[in-house]
Structure formats: C-alpha cells, structure tokens
Image (cartoon, coloured by chain):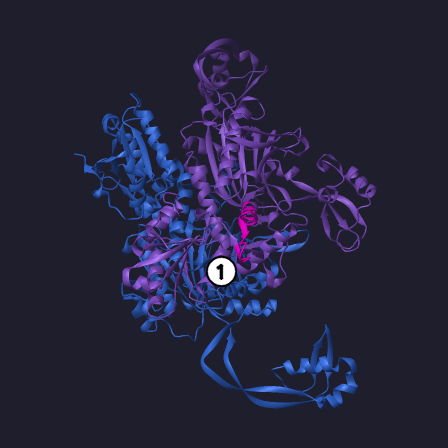
Chain colours: A blue, B purple
Amino acid sequence: MKDIRAKINDIAKRRGIFWGAYEIYGGVAGLYDYGPIGAMLKKNILDLWVEEFVFKDGLMLVDAPALGPEMVYRASGHLDKFSDYMVQCKSCGHAFRVDELLKDFVEVPDELTPQELEREIKRHGIRCPDCNGELGKVEEFHLMFSTRIGLDKIGFLRPETAQGIFVNFPTLYRINREKLPMGVAQIGRAYRNEISPRQGVLRQREFNMAEVELFIDPEAPFPENILDDIAIPLLTREGENIKISALEAYKSGLMVGYIAYYIARIFEFFKKLGIPEDRIRFRQHHRGELAHYSSDTWDCEILISRGWTEVTGISYRTSYDLERHMLHSGADMRAFRRFDEEREIEVTRIVPRMEILGPMFKGTAMKIARAMEEIEHYSGGELKVEVDGKTYTVPEEAFEVRKENKKVSGERFIPHVIEPSFGIDRIIYAILELTYYERPDSGYKVLRFPTKIAPMKVGVFPLMAKDGLDERARELLKTLRNSGIHAYYDESGSIGRRYARADEIGVPFCITVDYQSIEDETVTIRERDSTEQRRVPMKELPRLIRAMERDEVKFDELGTPVQ
Amino acid sequence: MKDIRAKINDIAKRRGIFWGAYEIYGGVAGLYDYGPIGAMLKKNILDLWVEEFVFKDGLMLVDAPALGPEMVYRASGHLDKFSDYMVQCKSCGHAFRVDELLKDFVEVPDELTPQELEREIKRHGIRCPDCNGELGKVEEFHLMFSTRIGLDKIGFLRPETAQGIFVNFPTLYRINREKLPMGVAQIGRAYRNEISPRQGVLRQREFNMAEVELFIDPEAPFPENILDDIAIPLLTREGENIKISALEAYKSGLMVGYIAYYIARIFEFFKKLGIPEDRIRFRQHHRGELAHYSSDTWDCEILISRGWTEVTGISYRTSYDLERHMLHSGADMRAFRRFDEEREIEVTRIVPRMEILGPMFKGTAMKIARAMEEIEHYSGGELKVEVDGKTYTVPEEAFEVRKENKKVSGERFIPHVIEPSFGIDRIIYAILELTYYERPDSGYKVLRFPTKIAPMKVGVFPLMAKDGLDERARELLKTLRNSGIHAYYDESGSIGRRYARADEIGVPFCITVDYQSIEDETVTIRERDSTEQRRVPMKELPRLIRAMERDEVKFDELGTPVQ
C-alpha cells in the first residue's frame, strides 16, 4: 500500500505533477506546488466541475476575496471555534495535533476537554513521535492565518470559501430575482494553519476548494423528481453499510432531499473523473464530529492506499450562518415566502394620541407619530422612537395599543443552506492513485486519466527527425495548438520510448507523422489505454480530438485500424 | 467621462458583475467581490489567456501557494524594497500615499527621499484630502501582508506570482529537459497592502494576475521569424509616440526581441477581448519608475475614462531573481549552454602529493585526495576539503597546482527572464467600459462582449409561458446546459424586455421558442449586436453555438433570416 504512494510521489516529482513548495529553502510543511501536469489537471477538473455543478443546474458562480475582516469570522463562529488541540514536545519542541496522537486510542477525541485529553495521553503512555520526548500541556491552537489590513485592521485568510457567499446573500438574492432554491458556487484557495501537517498533499495549509451553497426554503415541498434511482453506497451514523438510491435515502428519512440530490450528483462526477465505483462511499458524520455550523453531514470518501479518505463533504448548515451574520451586521438576511393564498394574521397597531404628543413634541410630533405607526411589535412600557437620527421616548399614555387582523401575502424567513464542499487537492491525489496502472508486459507506468481531464491531450511525434517529417509534425503541432488543444512535440528516442513517456503523464492520444503522411496527409493516432492505432486524415484531427474529449466520438470509430 | 464610470458601477452592482466586498459590515477598502457575471467573465478571459499564451506557445502552467516563507521575499528583494511612502493626517488619522498626493506637482516622486517629499508637501501646501487637516511625517509603509505559518515562522502573502516560479527553476528546467527558452505561466491571486486604495477595482489589495516568466539565454541568437510586421502604437521613454512593428522595434534596438514578441501577442490578445485598437498603446518606463528587479519595462496601457491605464507590464528582469535565489538558498539556479563546438579553456588542477597526504591522514588520505582533485578554483593558501561530513585542512606542501588546458562542450550560466504580467481585474474593468454601448433608438444598455468571453452565452425564452412553449423552452435549456453551454431561462415580461435584460449582461444569443417551434422544431435566434434574427433547427443549436464561440461559423450563415 505504501508502495503506490512512493510511486505516485516519484512520478509527481519527476514529471511535474506536484512537489513540496520552496524546496530550495528547505520547504514549508503543508505547502505544495503544482507543476505543469498537476496545474493543468487541476484546471481541467475544475472546468468539468463548473460544467457539472454550475452550468447544468444554472447556478451562480462568484469570486470573493480570501482576505476578510475580523467581524466576518467573529460572526461565522470561526474566531471562537476553529481550533485544534495541540501538544508540544518538551525536548524537541515539535508540535502535534492531539486528536492525531490519540486516534488509535480514543474514538471521538473531539468530544473531550483538554484535561481529559492530557489524561488520555498519559494513560496510553504517548510520547513524542519524533524524538520520544515527554509531551507538554494540551493547548488550543487557532487554525486561521491572521494579518493586518491597511494600518491596523485585523484580517484573516478564509478557512473556507463559504463565508464570501453568505455575507453576500442579500445582493445575490436580489440578482436572482428573489427566487429560492438559489445555488451559488465558488472555487478558490482556503487556508488552515495546521499544527503539523504530515499527510502530504492530503493535508495542506493552503488548499483548493470548490463549494456550492444552496439556499432553500425548509418549508417548501421537495421536488422528488430530481432524484434518480441509481444505487449508492452509504455508511450511516449507526455504522450500517447500505446501498440505496438517492430517492430511497430521501424517502426513508435518512437524509434531507437536497443532500440526497448532491450525493447522487457527486457519485456521477467522481465516476467521470475516473474513480472506480467501488472506491466511493458516503459516510454520515457522528454527532461529535459535526462542525459547529452543521446539523448533518455526509462525507464522500474515496478508498486510497491510506484508507477511506474524505474528499467532499455535504453539510446541512441550516440557517446558522445567515442568522449569525444578520445578528452581527444588522443586515436583513431573510428571503420572502409567498403563501399560496393570503392569510389573516393578528398584528399589533400603535395608535398615537396627538392630543398628548402635540404639546409634548411640538414641531416633531407628526414625524414621531408616523414612526410610531410603523412599529410592529410592542412588549409593554414606554416606546423608543428614532426620528432624523435622534431617539425620542414616548410615555405609555401618549398612545393606544390595538390588536387587528391584517391580510398578508407571505412572510420573511431565514433560508437554510445545503453545502457540498469539494477538496480539490485530495481529489487530484485520489485520481492519481486510482488511475495509476503498470502495463503487465513491460511494467511501464500509465496514468489512465479520462480524456476530458487529461492535462496534455496530444503528443506529436515524427517517426524520424529528418526527411521533412519533423517539419510536418511541427506544422501539425501548431495547427492543434491554434485550435485550443494542449499538445507537445517529441522527437527524442524510439517511438516506443516516446509512447512510454506520454503514458506516464496520461496523454490519451499520440500522433505519429510517418513517410505515408507526406504522401497522403494521414497520420497514425494511438490510444493510450488500448494501445491501438488508427490512421486518420491530418486535417480532421482538431475536430476529432475535441469530439473525443466531449465523448461525442469514440476512438474505434476513427479512420482505419493500423495492423 | 465620470458618467461612464457611474454607469458601469451601476450595472456592475445591479446585475452582478462586481461590488465592494463585505458590504454588510461596512466594506473593506480595496477588496471586491465578483458576482455571477463578473466571475464567469474572469474565468472566460483566463481560459482564453491559457489558450493564447500557454497552449499556443507550449508553455508550462504551474500553480504555487500564495503563502511563502520570509526567506523567499528576503531573497527577492521585496522585504527591503517593496514599500510606499505614506503620510497620515494629524486630524482625522487617514493615511495617504505620498506619490499620489504629489503626482500633479512632481514628475517622478519615486526618486525623492522622505525628507525631500516632506519638503514638497509643504512647498505646495498640500493638506489632507479628506478633512483638510495638517499632514504628518513621511514614513515608509511595507506593502506585503505578513502572517505566521505554524507556531512561529514568519510568512507573507505573495506580492506577485512570479517568485513561485523562480524558486522552482531547477525543477522546471529539469522537467523541460534542460531546454531554453523555457516559458512558465501562472494564474492566481496576489496581495498588496495598499495604504489607501481609492481607485475602485483598479487598485485592489487582493487582485488577480496572470504571468509568464520566459527564461532565456541572453547570448543565444534571437529567432527573428517569430516577430510579425503589424504596426503597434508605442510611447518611448523619450516621450515619442510611434507606430512600428515588433520586428522594427527589435531591429532598431528599441527593445529586446522577446519583449517585442510579447508586445505583438498582447496587442492581438486585447483586440480579441473586444478592446478597440486605438485604445491600446505600449509605454516604456522611465528609469526612476522601474521596479527594483527590472532593467527595462513596457506597460500595455488602455485608454479608459480615467486616462491611459496600465493593464499589463512586460519587464526585462535580467538574471536578477535567479541570482538572488542562488545566493540566498545556495541552490544551483544555472542552465547549461552548449557550445557549437568544443572549446579549450584553461583550468586549475590540484595534484595531491600522496607521500605527504598518506602519513598525514592515513586511512582517509585517498578520499581526501579524490576530493582535492574535484576542486576547480584555487586562490592560494591551504585547502579545506569535506569528506563524509567532516572538514579537513590540507597544507600547501601537500599538493601541486597546475594550469592545464581542457576541452569543454559548454558552460553554466544564469538565464535571463522576460516577464509579461497581466492585471486581470483592470483588464475586466477596461472591457466593461469599452464594450459598453447604448442603443441609439431606445437608450437600452448593451455590453458587447466577444462571444468567446461572454459570461452567459444564451438566453432561452418561451414566446408565452403557456401552451407548452414554456416546457419546450425548458427542455431546450436542459439540452444546452448538458452540452456545457452556460444558458438561462427567462419567461418574465415582453420579449423586448427580455432582450434588454440580456443585452445588459452581454448575452450574445437569445433563443425564442414560439408556436412554430412546436410544429417544426425550429426556433429563432437573435444576435445581440445586429439585433438580427434567424430561424434554425433546435437540435443544431449546441453545435452551432459552440462553433460561433470558436469563430468557426458566423451568425449570418445560420438557417434562414427572420423578417
């Protein structure tokens, strides 16, 4: 199992997928670079994500800053709650996450207090994993990176992209013409100052996310017809492994409708990325595991060498975030729910007594009276009324309180939020492990990326770097590149060697310009997985490659087979 | 002129292009959100950028973290030199950039000392622009955002994406099979803690960049054939406005070859983005204006309402960055230059005297002798030699120094760098101003985005929301979305009103499903700029829209015109 990790890390470094950042300065734990293959793989995965989750459902894609002011993260709860328990070694000074140290001994360390955690460390005789030294006190360590904006404003790097959407709810709701459900998507970097990141690209301090915040009316009927009946592997909170469809999962009450919807969509998405079906499952969080904002969460996990690994979470965030921002900012974060028919509700009406208000407030009396009439809630005693920025106190005898019936067409409420949140770096790593393959005959390494996400689509090879084959190959390269296809040229070594180099970075198609090409303007195209070759007219290539990328044409429909 | 700015900001806020971030908390100067139209416009511009600058030239796209350790920015010179002079108002406490305050009085404020700047402020009687209060002392203000990584490591948010490429030069050069020129591209956020950002989206604290670092051998002959002869407007350092081709600019010695190359490419790119030719010019930096790393810089400027505005810079960074990183990290940042034919050079050879070394170092003598033979430079005196991690001092009498001739096939050198650096937010704003148009008849507002970058490609409208037209329109919407086309549905108000709404966010094509559609499966498609309509078969639409996006089919070649 460890073997595959070593192999992936070797290809990653050697061929330019990823490597530890700032290596020439000794590196910084938890920071990684994507090389030319990795960066393009990431771009292609995100482009497919946009097609699947933004275009198909007509969502709004937005882009907010990673830097945010303190108030936002005070409201979101991150300032108070976004921390891990840390322990430092008394000898070497290295810091460790307590839950990581205890994970083999305690089931849900998140539920314990610092004192209890310290006791567990002692009880199990846990010492420093690096130098075997004695461990110190358990301390809380805040996971947000802080900085200063301007001269003296405290700011943070976002720990999730979500808050950049929540704070914009009023604007987005207006742009969406006040309709729910409303889906808003965002792609971007997020930051967590991990105490001691030790799981390679799986736990980074700066990482790539793609998130959807789906705002819904929790009282609106759920449109069952958007759920399909493909069976999906689930692991419930009770530890049950079941395989049921999104529709059944919703109908049985196991999860709310939109979580079921996204589980099915995510299942399909990962299959498109080349993840085998039996490596995917959706696991429900234990109560103690839930983030501070969530009432239910299902993780999409993929089985890689280190076990089932979370790559996406679908959280039911309820109205938590919008409520908090409404409270902290004073902005109205509510949506409007229209009733099927008008309803009569009892309202409180304040009726000013002008005979008392007049002498009391003179020229301002009318304005005060009007402000009093606007008041909808009265809980007894005198009234405070604001007029032109000044507050006036109106005694009880200056007004009457009447209960009246009023017809209303709807009411305001705070929407609930369903959040599918994708960890892009983990998805990339899972794809690498699960598309990795060694040819049984030669042992040559292949990354079997689906064509759509393959970083480099085409390799162009002259059979020999002479007799005009090289020039013709370079011309073809230029044509492909000008058609928006990421292609490269290779004339070094045998064709077999060039295929092997291409396979290792998952190039789906290799084109060879040979002597026949000069005569009849055809070339051979070789498909990575089958290693089969077909002969096609050169001028058709840009169209055919784009069509194969979109799955509109299959490789074995091209031209004529080469024996 | 101010008028257009107000109009753009109005559409931007109302229709979801951009707005000030964190508005519900009073906003943070210099931070902006892109709404659904702006974020998709940005994505499309960047996708085109990748096609033009990465695919076409076969560059390597990489993706490095925005967070970096102190050492990197000490080496790059940013820690010392990346600052502005600031002055605070003694009354209201607001801070201002001194060069902004002095820009109408002093030609190149960057060349003055703090004392001279203070004198200039006094001499011209400049007071606080906000409250007219007295201004305080001129102070240096550092523009990088700092934070802590892990427990105690100082880190910065990158002020440019470039350093994430430079520090990886050895790895990238190896991946590129040690060939130059080598182009590496990166897209991402960068950060500058501006003292007092006051120019809207044009000066942001968190902004979007797209950069190319082209590593070249300064002694290699420049391939003139990559330059074309399209005339480009230039403004030289001497203040001369000229219009010459990239080829002439290079041949006349006005700029180095690769700067000329990129000037031509950038000129074409901006025209593709919808910027009129006469709004583009390339201006050479004055000496005092050059960044600390640059020996020559040409800015691409676009003429918008506030005047000629820098949107892209092309800097000749020489070997500055690689040299600095080599010095600070000790890593070898050199490339290898192969000579046309082998050359004889004089080398120093150390010849160990075993008769002295043997008794002196016993069992280690052979290893020490071998290490001495590796030494290429000798500047007199005793030698220090490292063997198995230990340092040995070898006295002068234990070796002979010979000068010998040696044949070498090449030499190591530090490559030079040409850097085109695109400010994506400014480009977006320029596109908005320069594609904005009001229909002469109706006064309706139109954003005439080129189809390729239009955020929303298609609006689908049922003529009436009844008689099955709405269902058929929704089916068509689904087909388009499943083909990867960003489309939306609108059934509200007259068709004219719906066209007007579409025009305002630059939708190039609007499709109407009418009664004829139910009969013969055709629809009308209306083009935004000409407002002409043509009738086409529904099932052809996904292919046709994709083809028009790629400029492979023109609108007036579609189906039949509607009178």
Report in which chain the residue with disc 1 lies.
Answer: B
Asked whether residue B452 is in view, the answer is yes
Bounds of the magenta span? B427-445
Where is residue B479 shown, x and y percent of the image?
Answer: 33, 58
Check the image and report above or below for B214 versus A89.
Answer: above
Check the image and report above or below for A25 versus B526.
Answer: above
Q: Residues within 10 Å of mark 1 (few under 14, many from 20)?
A: some
- In this view, the residue in front, B233 or A158, is B233
Check the image and report above or below for B92 versus B348.
Answer: below
Quadrant of the frame with the C terminus of chain B: bottom left
Q: How many marks?
A: 1
> Is residue A188 left or right of B8 when viewed as pictured?
left
Where is residue A194 shown, x and y percent of the image?
Answer: 50, 52
Check the image and report above or below for A35 versus B400.
Answer: below
* Amino acid bearing label 1: Arg
Which residue is at a point 34% across and 69% down the rendered structure image? Answer: A238
Residue on which disc 1 sits: B501
Where is residue A102 shown, x and y percent of the image?
Answer: 44, 58
Q: Residue furthest left?
A: A563
Asked whether residue A34 is in view, the answer is no
- In this view, the residue in front, A365 or B114, is A365
Which residue is at a point 52% across and 36% down the rendered structure image? Answer: B267
Q: Specify whether residue B508 is painted magenta.
A: no
Where is residue B97 shown, x and y percent of the image?
Answer: 71, 45
- In this view, the residue in front, B321 or A414, is A414
